[in-house]
Amino acid sequence: MNDKSKKNKKENNAPPTELKTKDYERELKKLHIEMVKLQEWVRHQGLKICIVFEGRDGAGKGGAIKAITERVSPRIFRVVALPAPTDREKSQMYLQRYAPYWPAGGEVVIFDRSWYNRAGVERVMGFCTEEQAVHFLEMVPQVEKAMVDSGIILIKYWLEVSPEEQTRRLEGRIEDGRKIWKLSPMDLQSYSRWYDYSRARDAMFAATDTPWAPWYVARSDDKKRARLNIIRHVLSQIPYEETPRDPVKLPKRQKAGDYQEPNYPFKFIPEAY
């Protein structure tokens, strides 16, 4: 290989340049406009959309979900992040606690972690037996087939983060008072078992990456690019059109008439800023 070929190969493998905040915000605004169009189409057509986010701790699931939902209505876009199961829920059929949250017509439901807990954290950390995990992987493709056959558009994302970037982000949580709540004792235990999680991920993909409910992988070391790429991909997976709407114009505000502002001692908050 000559020097020129070596140089070209090195340039092709080089990481992309950092995405400037103004460029990120410009592209995000464009995508948010499309997300609003999608929202109106979902409401107009009564679509049922279920989006699943999975990935290791620190992979960026929460940030991606926030980027998707920050400009749309929470009445249509619902985020589901279930806590640990209660004793009653532990006695139920495994998927029973998730089914009530699946979307009805005109809804988009986003799972920040999902029923795939059984294939990941529960399996790795010993919260279920190996037999239960294997049974789950055998069963869930048919459940998802039933969901899709009922008209639900099911989109599953795995956010792939590198070991180095995960370490950087989790260390950042320790040092940032705004993020320390994100770091639980379970996260610390999970951090030490990287390759156990890799094996669990591989088994999950092998069993549940189906034609009717495929897994889509998003590289998430670059948070900004990951968010833009995910939103763009979501939009590409759901056929939608711009919903016709009448032109909007503010009506005239009524005249005060005999109304007078009251001389009331309103308790205004301190204006420290």
Image: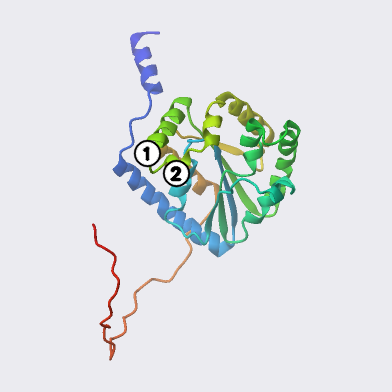
Q: Position of residue 53 (x, y in %)?
A: 55, 42
Q: Mark 1 points at which residue?
A: 176
Which sits earlier in the primary sequence, circle 2 or circle 1?
2
Question: Residue tagged by mark 2?
Answer: 63
* Discs 2/1, front: 1
The percent coordinates of residue 140 (x first, y second) are: 71, 42
* Image vertical order of residue 266 relative to residue 215, above or below: below
Name the residue: 59% across, 29% down.
Answer: 197
Alpha-carbon distance for marks 2 and 1? Answer: 16 Å
Q: Which residue is drawn at 44% across and 28% down?
A: 167
Expressed as whole percent of the image width and height from the top left, the position of residue 187 reads 53, 35
Q: In which quarter of the image is residue 71?
A: bottom left
- Relative vertical location of residue 261 with respect to residue 234 in this rendering, above or below: below
Q: Which amino acid does label 2 sit on?
A: Gly
Q: Which of 96 and 149 is in front in this view?
A: 96
The residue type indicated by label 1 comes to: Asp
Residue at the extreme bottom of the image, as rendered: 258
The relative height of residue 99 versus residue 57 in the rendered view (above or below) is: below
| Label 2 crowd (10 A; few <14 / some 14-19 / many >=20) | some
Q: Position of residue 184 (x, y in %)?
A: 51, 38
What is the quadrant of the N terminus in the image? top left
User: In the image, 2: left or right of 103?
Assistant: left
